[in-house]
Image (spheres, rainbow, N blue to C red):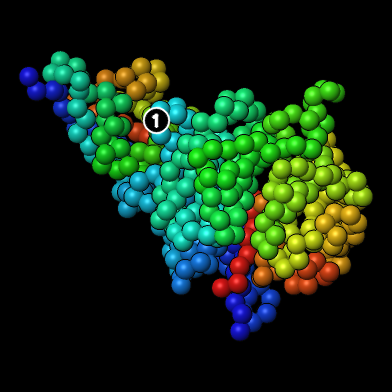
Amino acid sequence: MTDAMLAIGTRKGLFLARSSGGSAFEVEPIQFSTVAVHAVAIDTRGTTPRLLAGIEYGHFGPSVLYSDDLGKTWQEADRPPIAFPEKTEATLTRVWQLTPSPSEPGVVWAGAEPGALFRSEDGGVTYSLVEGLWEHPHRRHWQPGGGGLCLHTIICHPADPRVMAVAVSAAGFYRTADGGLSWEAANQGIRAPFLPEGQQYPEFGQCVHKVAMHPSRPGRLYLQHHFGVYRSDDFGGTWTDIGSALPSDFGFPIVTHPAEPDSVYVLPLHADLDRTPVGHRYRLYRSDDAGGAWRPLERGLPEGPVYATVLRDAMTFSEAGLFFGTRDGEVHGSRDAGESWEPIARHLPDVLTVRAAVL
Amino acid sequence: MAKSVTMVVFVLPASLRRWVSGRTEVKVFAVGADHESPPTLGSALDMLRRTHPLLEERIRDDYGRIRRHISMIVCGENSRGLGGLDCALPPGAEVYVLPALA
């Protein structure tokens, strides 16, 4: 029988939910009450799954915790797990992303604010700054988006550890082919409509909201921009607008179907000045031809009206199913790739991140 | 000539005790720059970083600054009005760590 776990990070704590043999998810009691949980990961690479949580202790700053018993107990490194070297004169503001490497055992990547990538070689316990990205000449020109100068997306090639990419708001998409020693901006074709006319296709400075890669076709990327949904078939070398058939091309999360590289999902909001779901319903849009045509998915979702958003990391699609959480504390799940939905949780604090895995 | 040394007591709020096994206070020996200079709040926190790194990380950021929403009360006065990290500590000083209320 298959067991699945859902990790739900919220503004005021972490919630774990378990499902056994296809049964309904049961949400466990709150952990880290009043502590914001901005990033979670369920690392199933080892014989024992490890949970990782990037948390923020309010006045006392951020940290990373880990659990090797599925959340019964949590540990913290005996030194600050993520810290900038003194020479950078930078202070860790938030951990936005925790991504186990698919190609290097023991390696976990962390995306941090302000605009930095960290690498762990001990399974996510302690991390070191990736200096190649920090020293990039563009970095001092990066401007923060509304959420801060956050490195929120980490894309790892499934087999080649030298090839990876990150996205930073509002700096854009950057990729490396040498394991992080050198990086190049890869934003060609992404329009930045918030810039003056004639300057809307800069080398960098795009407000990328989220990027998803399909593991079976690593060159295939999907990107949700601040106005605009894009696809790349050459790992970011060029980008093509695929959002014109959507009711709105503004939104935050974007995910791919784990088995179908042409299937992509977004959750459109009306606009940047009206960050409510299109039609005031939680309604995903799915394309099965890599962004040519889109159709809405809403069966089983609240009829509304609803007004809360779904944040960039609050939607996930894995072998365990398709899930999203909302800023008004709802979590919904689908076991048939979004065709029908069931509520998993209500009345949680606002949901910041959702991750799921088969254990 | 030996450097000046004094014991400092950090009195902790409930929200910080998780990093010191529930203790309400932590004692460290703070060391001055030389025999004439008294130990400072900064030198006491430097010592705290050596003895209790996870606790110190919650009080100061990576760059050694006291976190924005934390006040350090030295002998009844906010250290921000006493020179901040350069605030001199008398022998046996009690330093109350106070997070802002919200």
Q: Secondary structure at mark 1?
A: helix
What residue does disc 1 label?
A: A86
Compared to A16, does B65 lie above or below? above
x and y, in percent, of residue A239 in the image: 78, 43
Q: Residue furthest bottom?
A: A1
Compared to A238, does A348 lie above or below? below
Q: Chain of mark 1?
A: A
Question: Which residue corresponds to the image point at 49% horizontal and 54% vertical from the top-left?
Answer: A108
Question: Which residue corresponds to the image point at 19% horizontal and 34% vertical from the top-left?
Answer: B29
> Who is closer to the viewer here, B6 or A147?
A147
x and y, in percent, of residue A145 in the image: 68, 33
A67 sits to left or right of A159? left
User: How many numbered callouts?
Assistant: 1
Residue A332 in view (yes/no):
no
> Who is closer to the viewer here, B83 or B94?
B83
Q: Residues within 10 Å of mark 1 (few under 14, many from 20)?
A: few
x and y, in percent, of residue A319 in the image: 67, 70
Amino acid residing under circle 1: Glu
Question: Which residue corresponds to the image point at 25% horizontal and 42% vertical from the top-left?
Answer: B51
Q: Quadrant of the N terminus of chain A?
A: bottom right
Residue A356 in view (yes/no):
yes
Q: Say which quarter of the image contains residue A138.
A: top right
A39 sits to left or right of B98? right
Q: Quadrant of the C terminus of chain A?
A: bottom right
Compared to A319, does A84 lie above or below? above
> Who is closer to the viewer here, A7 or A27?
A7
x and y, in percent, of residue B26 in the image: 27, 41
Question: Which residue corresponds to the image point at 90% horizontal and 50% vertical from the top-left?
Answer: A246
Q: Residue furthest left?
A: B1
A238 sits to left or right of A93? right
